[in-house]
Image (spheres, helix red, strand yellow):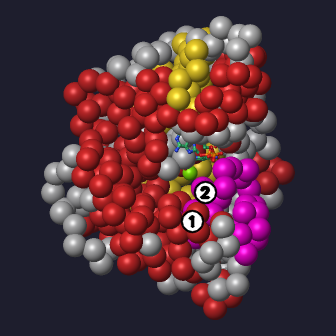
Amino acid sequence: MVKTLCILGATGSIGVQALDVARLRGYKITALTANGRIDILENQIREFSPAYAAVANEEKARELKIKVADTSVKVLSGKEGVKECAAMGADAVLNGIVGIAGLEPTLAAIDAGSTLALANKESLVTGGKLVTDRAAAKGVAILPVDSEHSAVFQSLQGCRDKKQVKKLILTASGGPFFGKKKDELKDITPEQALAHPNWSMGAKITIDSATMMNKGLEIIEAAWLFDMAPEKIDVLVHRQSIVHSLVEYEDNSVIAQLGVPDMRIPIQYALTYPDRFESPAAELDLAACASLTFEKPDNDTFRCMDYCRQALSKGGLYPAAVNAANEKANLLFRQGKIGFTDIQESVGRALEMNLPTGEYTLEDVLETDRAVREER
Ligand code: NDP
Ligand code: MG
């Protein structure tokens, strides 16, 4: 039973919603972290009185220290400060950091023996083997926060033998450009790509949804979380985002989890598992949904998902390479420096690199990430 909770990436979309759940459930917040949005963090410190806070950006950390000098919070700074918060040993650590910056804090939380509620999919994408091996060695549970993975996890409850699972079916909203062809995508602006039809999320994942890279990352995430071969993970476009994912069993039964598109449902389940409680999210009114539709994704137009599958099949450092290429290109696109379709071209190019496909260390992953970013 979670009583104490550390939230990494507290000022982001996931972090703020995790604090909604914490408020409702009455969790004691031990530590909160951010990168630079210290005004939001200051308010959170005043409301939740954590013993520690960390800000990755050193200058912003100094500013925060002054702002909260009248409180009892101890402000840590830099990457190390964030890791220190992760390593403090709360009942659960919720990782809502965006990007590979979440990998080392994930490992630190596992080393401390805290249950890991994981939203930071990039931890598993870049360091899947490191993270899952270490969690197994420490006996630490990784509970998925990503809505699709929470849905799969929920649909697997009661399954005694994974061999009876025929496949996982991840659903995808398709993003704002589903149905468009490649030549219609060339002039897409960041503003258009940031307008997601169903979910309100951070900027990076919203662009990942528009390129379908998000679903590619989620295939890799699912492979590690559920120890599933890539060919047993399917994707269906489901425009309404009501069915969050499905599991098909040997007997052709398909079990799914449904709910309104509100991340507080999977966040809360990750923190209260195996129990369920009232939710801050709304009830699902299926009659009001009118229709639920399912279609095949268009992998010729949106290439990122296939590139992620290829990276997963190649193994080793390839998933870290496609992730780095995407993180860099995603940012350059948001800054208006490259076009929308350049993102997938950049991800595809990472597969052409010559990288080891066997065992790897944390340093190998970080070095691959650096090398790919520098090249672009
Ligand atoms: P946001 O951009 O909204 O928030 C990211 C958080 O991480 C912020 O607190 C930010 O701090 C912090 N952060 C950013 N860079 C660093 C860094 N270098 N070091 C330490 N902290 C940093 O992202 P989201 O909440 O949307 O997403 C978080 C993660 O959850 C991602 O991995 C995403 O894929 C996953 N996810 C998100 C969903 C959603 O609905 N948002 C759904 C499913 C998964 P600051 O605010 O100060 O910049
Ligand atoms: Mg998701």
Going from the N terminus, do you reach mark 1 or mark 2 first? 2
* Viewer-nearest residue: 228 or 309: 309
Residue at (53, 23) in percent of width and height: 76
Q: Is residue 212 left or right of residue 195?
A: left
Q: Is residue 27 left or right of residue 286?
A: left
On the image, the x and y values in percent for residue 302 come to 54, 77
Label 1 Cα neighbours within 10 Å, binned few <14 / some 14-19 / many ≥20 = many
Percent across and percent down for residue 63 are: 68, 30
Q: Is residue 201 magenta?
A: yes
Residue under the point 24% across and 52% down:
364
Residue plotted at (53% across, 29% down): 77
Kind of residue at badge 2: Lys
> Can I make out residue 59 in this image?
yes
Ligand 1 closer than 8 Å to label 2 CB: yes
- Considering every residue shown, the one lying at the far bottom of the view is 183
Q: Which mark is residue 138?
A: none
The percent coordinates of residue 150 (x first, y second) are 52, 40
Q: Mark 1: is the Cβ under 8 angstroms from ligand 1?
A: no
Please, what is the three-letter code of the amino acid marked with disc 1?
A: Asn
In this rendering, position of residue 306 left or right of residue 245: left
Please name the residue that numbered disc 2 is placed on: 204
Q: Quadrant of residue 24?
A: top right
Q: Quadrant of residue 306?
A: bottom left
Q: Are marks 1 and 2 in contact (CB under 8 Å)?
A: yes
Q: How many marks?
A: 2
Which span is picked out in magenta?
A: 189-213
Q: Which residue is mark 1?
A: 330
